[in-house]
Image: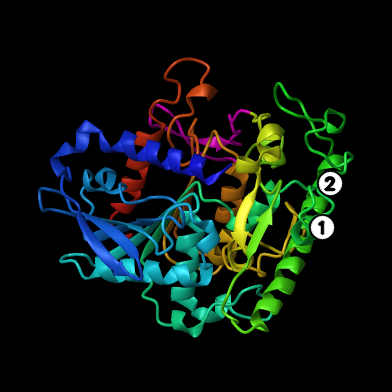
Amino acid sequence: MKTTAYVLAMLTIVSVLSFDPSHSVFAQSNPRYINLGSNAVGALYTPDSGSYSNVGIIVGHPTSNSLQCGPAWASRGFMTLCFNPRYGVSHENAISWETIILDVRSAVNALKSQPGITKIVLVGASGGGPLMTTYQDVAENGPSVCQGLDKLVECGNNLAGLPPADGIILNDSIPGYGVNAIRSINGAVTNDNAILNNNRPPRINPNLDPFNPKNGYNPNGSSNYSQDFQKKYFEAQANRMNILIDEALTKLHEIEASADPTDDAPFIVPRGDNARLSELDLSIHHATVSPRKLLKNDGTIEDCCIVESVRLPQPEDAANNASFSDGTLFLTVRSFLSLRSIRAWNSFTGLDIDSVNNVTVDHLRRITVPLLIFTSGAHYFIRDNEIHYENAASADKDFVVTEGGAHTGPPCVPCEKFPGQYSNSAINQMNYMVNWLNKPGRF
């Protein structure tokens, strides 16, 4: 799924929640814009009543505009700082993951300086998940967690002394930018060296082509890939990613040996997106593996059963992956290595999560503050977020699936079997988050 889809999903949930009339007593009408330094900007929302919780909320995303996130929180009595990092919106080709963390620090310091704010909770939706967990891990444990010879890109000691937050909420967090990338590249491409160095068109191995009906692709519904094909394809995705990493490292070493060692170079990857098997075959990562909490549309919690995703297949990925605009990654050597790469031997079961710094589960296994994880019941991150919960070190942790929620929570209307089946998904999710924050003794 392209970044624009994530943006639309998050804008939808903001618009739904902002107009909830039951909390209008705390409405926010005039956010205050804050310069966070280094081109990072924030919008501070304070309830118009002037009364607010001692728990301050911070919301941010690496590539999407978060500045309108505040009304939903302010209407429920929370001062909220929504921020955009220094790289702006939809500029993946500029991102240094090891630097973007400094913008979270600026947001934390800005909100902690507000009168009455004694606790900070980081909220990470979608790509905000790895952003907030990376920050908190480094804040709790120091920059050594993002350093070492196993890292494709190391962070600097300038990340020492980050002020830790007091809690984290993850809303359908991605497993990581590198994880998303490896699962979305077309593993059937066999000539990346020629593509990158000689501008050759991609060459496709038909036996690994996920859009070949002989391999299980269905252009009219859910595809059905055999276990054998899945294994071969996931291994091919890992192999292609490792080739791309080696090419990028070679180019980086050439840059570092040049007259301008801080320079960069383009890194363009055709058929680098929209070839994710779980978007095509609904049997892949289709459910939790254990009984989990399901937040139903009537607001009740069902806590008895394995939860199945109700998402729909996306056979249109065949055209998207082949297209210039939707199937190509436009990166640089440095942004690819920092953001969109990961070493692996299998894109699902063989990820080297220590090789990069933006893998959500890697950080959660060291974070200790209270943690609430929501995942959307009509999206394909349902199992990934269960894995996040299973591996999280926090003693106080909760995991909830939003019934019928599209990515980050708004209702998946096309998934409904009758009108309004999932109409309350976003409101119910927000109310649960607020109740979690307000539990006596938690903060």
Q: Quadrant of residue 54?
A: bottom left
Specify how the rendered protein is coloured. Answer: rainbow
Whether residue 290 is visible here, answered yes or no, is no
Q: x, y percentage for residue 127?
A: 50, 53
The image shows residue 52, relative to residue 298, as above or below, that is: below
Q: x, y percentage for residue 142?
A: 49, 80
**Regarding mark 1 in the picture, which secondary structure is present there?**
helix
- Label for residue 203? 2
The answer to whether residue 205 is magenta is no
Q: Which residues are magenta?
A: 289-312
Tag 2 and tag 1, C-beta contact below 8 Å: yes
Q: x, y percentage for residue 373?
A: 47, 50
Residue 332 located left or right of residue 140:
right
Q: Quadrant of the C terminus?
A: bottom left
Say what amino acid the circle numbered 2 marks.
Arg
Q: Residues within 10 Å of mark 1 (few under 14, many from 20)?
A: few
Report the label total. Answer: 2
Q: Quadrant of the N terminus?
A: top right
The answer to whether residue 298 is magenta is yes
Say what amino acid the circle numbered 1 marks.
Ala
Q: Residues within 10 Å of mark 2 (few under 14, many from 20)?
A: few
Circle 1 is placed at which residue position? 194
Q: x, y percentage for residue 36?
A: 30, 68
The secondary structure that dominates the magenta segment is: loop
Whether residue 418 is visible here, answered yes or no, is yes
3D distance between C-alphas at marks 2 and 1: 10 Å
**Regarding mark 2 in the picture, which secondary structure is present there?**
loop
Return the residue nearer the eye: 378 or 189: 189
Please tell me which of labels 2 and 1 falls first in the chain. Answer: 1
Q: Residue at x 63, y 52 (%)?
A: 329
